[in-house]
Image: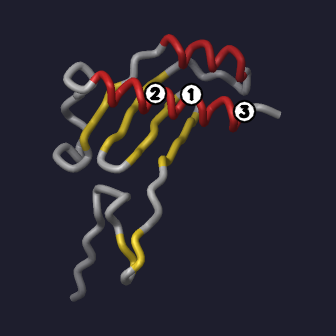
Amino acid sequence: MRRTSYPTDLTEAQWGHTPLSERTLFWDLFGKMAAVYGRWKIVGTIDNHHGKWDQAQAQIERTSFELYDLRTDLGEQHNLAAQHPEIAAEMKQRYLAWFREATTP
């Protein structure tokens, strides 16, 4: 039986000899929000915005996100936002920039 190992740090993942490019992955599903960059993941929740992007953006700006280190906490049990406020803030800014771009007609 062949075993497959999946990396927890997408910036270090490799297919053959070519590493994946460094990138941030974002998602929003009915107000459930997250972003992953390298070993870090932020998670936040706002009310279901029903496509009212301006209202959603204002809520996102006021929302505190949780921060997880996927290298050491794949189960997302230990919120590190207080220990790494600069990383949490940077990830939130990336999320906001993506959300603005994704929702601008």
Residue 61 in the image: above or below residue 67: above
Task: Give the foreground label among 3 and 1.
Answer: 1
* Residue type for callout 2: Lys
Task: Give the foreground label among 3 and 2.
Answer: 2
**Distance between the alpha carbons at the discs numbered 3 and 1:** 11 Å
Q: Which mark is residue 103?
A: 3
User: Residue 76, located in which quarter of the rendered image?
Assistant: top left
Left or right? Give the position of 87 relative to 28: left
Residue 21 location in percent, x, y? 47, 62
* Residue type for callout 1: Leu
| Mark 2 surroundings within 10 Å by alpha-carbon count, few (fewer than 14), some (14 through 19), many (20 or more) | many
Residue 102 in the image: above or below residue 64: below
Residue 15 location in percent, x, y? 39, 78
**Distance between the alpha carbons at the discs numbered 3 and 2:** 16 Å
Left or right? Give the position of 34 relative to 9: right
Instruction: Specify the farthest residue to the bottom.
Output: 1
Secondary structure beneath dot 1 equals helix
Residue at image point 21% right, 50% down: 71
> Camera-side residue: 38 or 41?
38
Residue 68 in the image: above or below residue 84: below
| Mark 3 surroundings within 10 Å by alpha-carbon count, few (fewer than 14), some (14 through 19), many (20 or more) | few
Residue 2 location in percent, x, y? 24, 86
Residue at image point 52% right, 19% down: 46
Q: Which residue is mark 1?
A: 96
Circle 2/circle 1 CB separation < 8 Å = yes
Circle 3/circle 1 CB separation < 8 Å = no
**Distance between the alpha carbons at the discs numbered 2 and 1:** 6 Å
User: Residue 65, located in which quarter of the rendered image?
Assistant: top left
Q: Which mark is residue 21?
A: none
Secondary structure beneath dot 3 equals helix
